[in-house]
Amino acid sequence: MQSVTFSDKLKQVPTLQQMAEQASTYLDKIISPQSAPIVSAEWDRAEDDQGQQLVTLALKENGEAVTARFSANDFQDGWEVKHRIRSTWDDLLRIRIHKSLEHLKRLKDNAEE
């Protein structure tokens, strides 16, 4: 990974920070070595509409970002956290593929002119 950061706001709640740090180890397993140098992860703390504390994960690459939100209860189920992190990574990959296809289409259109 280019970088993995934990916000000061998240660090104010050590139990949430520990949960995010543990979940963060899964990122290294799913993000390929080819993608790792250009992808960054940012863990933060937020609140939902009811005031419940949440942990957010933002995956960023080349100006694009996708975000997942986790409650403390979500971290109790390792499979759920892994699934949601994987899904968030898949969302970022879809954006990358869409941008690549747009670029190829522009190249094709320019070549036909």
Image: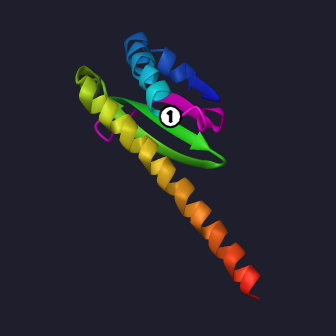
Q: Is residue 48 magenta?
A: yes
Q: Residue at x 53, y 34 (%)?
A: 32
Q: Which type of secondary structure does the marked residue at label 1 adopt?
A: loop
Q: Quadrant of residue 76?
A: top left
- Image color mode: rainbow
Observer able to see residue 51: no
Observer able to see residue 108: yes
| Quadrant assignment for the N terminus | top right
Amino acid type at mark 1: Ile
Query: Is 51 displayed left or right of 30 in the figure?
Result: left
The percent position of residue 35, horizontal first and vertical second, equals 59, 38
Q: Nearer the viewer, residue 67 or 47?
A: 67
**57 versus 72 height, above or below:** below
Q: Counting other residues with Cα less than 10 Å from the Cα at mark 1, is it few (<14), some (14-19), or many (20 or more)? A: some
Q: Residue at x 64, y 69 (%)?
A: 104
Q: Residue at x 58, y 41 (%)?
A: 60
Residue where numbered disc 1 is placed: 31
Q: Quadrant of residue 85?
A: top left
The percent position of residue 70, horizontal first and vertical second, equals 34, 32
Query: Is 104 displayed left or right of 30 in the figure?
Result: right
Tag count = 1
**55 versus 92 height, above or below:** above
Q: Nearer the viewer, residue 51 or 95?
A: 95
Q: Nearer the viewer, residue 61 or 13?
A: 61
**101 versus 52 height, above or below:** below
The percent position of residue 88, horizontal first and vertical second, equals 42, 43
The segment highlighted magenta reads 32-51
| Quadrant assignment for the C terminus | bottom right
Q: Residue at x 68, y 75 (%)?
A: 106
Q: Is residue 37 magenta?
A: yes
